[in-house]
Amino acid sequence: MRSTAERATSDRLAAWFTEQGATLVEADILLPAETLLDLYGEDIRARAYMTVDPVRGEMMLRPDFTVPVVQQHMAGGAEPAIYAYSGPIFRKQDRAGDRPSEYHQAGIEIFRRDQPEQSDARVFALIDRVLREHGLALRPLTGDIGILMAAVRGLATSDRRKQALLRHIWRPQRFRALLDRFSGRAPVPAARRHLLDRLAQGSPAALIAQAGTFTGLRSEAEIAARAEALIQDAQTPPLAAPEAALLYDLLSLQAPARAALSHLRGIAPMLPAITPAVDRFAARLEALADHGIDTDTLPFEASHGRTSLEYYDGFVFTFHAEDPALPPVASGGRYDALTAVLGQGKSIPAVGGVIRAGLLARLTGDQA
Amino acid sequence: MIKIGVPSKGRLMEKTFDWFGARGVTLRLDGAEREYSGAVEGVEGVELVLLSAGEIPRELAAGRIHLGVTGSDLVREKLADWRAQVAELAPLGFGHADLILAVPVSWIDVDTLDDLDAAAAAFRRSHGFRLRIATKYHRLVRDFLTTQGIADYQLVDSQGATEGTVKNLTAEAIADITSSGETLRANHLKILSDALIHSSQAMLFLSQRADWTPEDRKALTLLAGKLGVTVPNS
């Protein structure tokens, strides 16, 4: 249950963001479900509350502010823009426990084309500062999905394999399975070998005809196209061992930010495609240092932020309390690609972060 | 008095009666034919409640029955965080059925989840909507596909004749319970080789939410002794 303290804390945080230059915005609580379903897929149904409007169809109770705030901005906001907001969001919880399914978030989003690293640092530093002003010394953790994406784009392999990896960048398990297969660490499944043998002897059309009565909307041409793609993929050599090793190394990189930067500078000559992303990482650390953040000790994990129902494609961060059972008190990141998805042809670099106001109030003992 | 919920009709009811009967506990219908009223003999303090198998998970979760016999698939589908609400006392060895994913036999390029995922990505690109999987097991299927990291699909609800949805062009694939696979074959569908979502069977469940008085506990101990099942501590 939400308390008056939670709401007051959330509103106060948003007011503080406006004092730092942000414009306060509102967002609907009832959102059209289709946008969010298109974005997150079926997984969102397990996390968001669905309802039905007699005229507008399937609706969703706001599961976060980012999507409606991005939509508002893309519909005609001036550039650059800094927005602040405060209000309840709704997330289904699968397990009985004390994680609330309705809680207040206060947040800030920056839409700005130039100097993205400055904006990254500004969001992080503002949240860091306001948490400190509340007397909380939380454990920050940072990451940069842009480096991993750049590494994938730079692999010496087919575009199809790169696209498959990029599509699953937020699903670590499937990403790993693909990487294992593309690097030859996992064997080709027996059924795939069998299919390839049969395709070597007959055309896809002949095999489809042999398979039995044709049913369904997925056409023969679509099936044949993927069969051809499988043949091509089978002829694609595995990722070169050193390249694969670098990618596995990158996935498990955990170090203080400055040390991580040195490590990345060390592997960049062997994986030159990551250099621009590593340069951005370096520029961000400079910007963070300018805000007084100690980048020698700031924890960094290259895989941080790779969870489903996320859309971050660059800088990511969280702030954690000591108790590991608690969700992060604050989190955020850069989501340039999301604005393109929601912008119907337009896009703008964007970064933001949110604070769980109720958790902050609880940790600071403000239960009034 | 502890209440035990048992499916009210068909083979599931008969097999349940047989299973208890073989262990010295007689469950029987009494009253007129078609009247859903029953009796328990061979152990004191136990009352028989006849219910639809599909309602037994809900009744267990609400604590309106202490024990219940139903499919393990139904409990997992209908109860979120089911382990917090019920405990499995014993598998009964019948009512076996597998919840599987099936696609058209003509999809020569799809045999595994990996294939389904790739086909779903291409399907969405060419058709403009996410590949539809027809099922009535929304929770089980979605949790499974989330864990497996499958994207670009949507679940469409189908409460019956699910195998027909592909031919009717209301779904591209299905997730359903099958025991022999005959209906699948008749509808030109094949099972994915690595997508066994749940292997279901009839199971005796205990409600964690029911009011267990000391007398009920005693009756449970006696019943469990006869049935040869272990009761978890709580």
Image: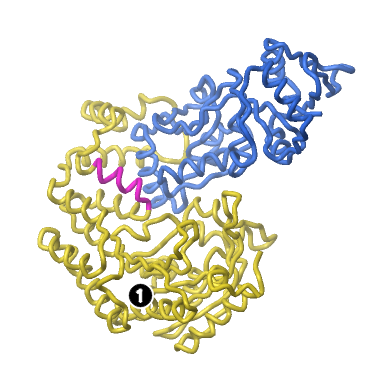
Chain colours: A yellow, B blue
- Position of A282 compared to B75: left or right? left
From this view, report whether residue B195 is shown above or below residue A100. above
Q: Which residue sits at x=57%, y=59%?
A: A91
- Position of A48 compared to A228: left or right? right
Residue A230 position in % (x across, y down): 26, 39
Secondary element under disc 1, as helix, strand or loop, is loop
From this view, report whether residue B8 is shown above or below residue A367. above
From this view, report whether residue B18 is shown above or below residue A1. above
Q: Which residue sits at x=51%, y=31%?
A: B198
Amino acid at pointer 1: Pro
Name the residue carrying label 1: A349
Residue range (magenta): A171-181
Tell me which corner region of the image, top left, top right, bottom left or bottom right, holds residue B5. top right
Tell me which corner region of the image, top left, top right, bottom left or bottom right, holds residue B108. top left
Q: Is residue A101 magenta?
A: no
Q: Which residue sits at x=62%, y=66%?
A: A30
Quadrant that contains the N terminus of chain A: bottom right
Residue A50 position in % (x across, y down): 61, 56
Outermost left residue:
A269
